[in-house]
Image (cartoon, grey):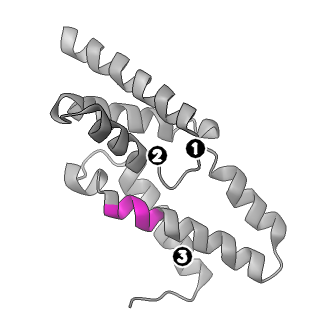
Amino acid sequence: MFEIDNIDELYALQKGLMEIRFNATDVDWAVKGSPFLSRVHERLVETIIAHHEEIGESRKAQGWRDWRRFEARAMERPAVREYLAEMWDELPTPEVKREAVVDQMRPFVFSDENVTEMIAEIETEWRKRSAR
């Protein structure tokens, strides 16, 4: 399997995934919303944290853990909301919608309450758009 053993390459990949998943506007919807990509992104961040722990950099590892807290993500939260509000009516069931929200919230750490709040935000945004 593919392997990266250089922390700088991991950082570069992390930055690229953040850009594609949360910042870029001209990205194919299937790529931006890919559950596979979200799981890879999650594993990548976990690998970065583990690397710092393994070499005794517990403060850096903790910094990454803090960074992962979804409730602290000011930029990504609106990106998730905007992306999913565009396609909300195409998701057929509440379960599929919840799964899509969870996929978009990765690589961050979140609670069920965070997911429920995000769903409410998306539904509010979707209703606004539908009323136009």
Identify whether 117 is placed above or below 69.
above
Q: How packed is label 2: few (under 14 Cα within 10 Å), some, or many (20 or more)?
A: many
Residue underneath mark 3: 10
| Residue 132 in view | no
Residue underneath mark 1: 110
Identify whether 1 is placed above or below 51.
below
Amino acid type indicated by mark 3: Leu
**Range drawn in magenta:** 36-41
Identify whether 50 is placed above or below 108.
below
**126 or 100: nearer the viewer:** 100
**114 or 73: nearer the viewer:** 114
Residue underneath mark 2: 105
Secondary structure at badge 3 equals: helix
Image quadrant occupied by the N terminus: bottom left
Image quadrant occupied by the C terminus: top left
Q: CA distance from mark 1 to mark 2?
A: 8 Å
Q: Residue at x 20, y 15 (%)?
A: 130
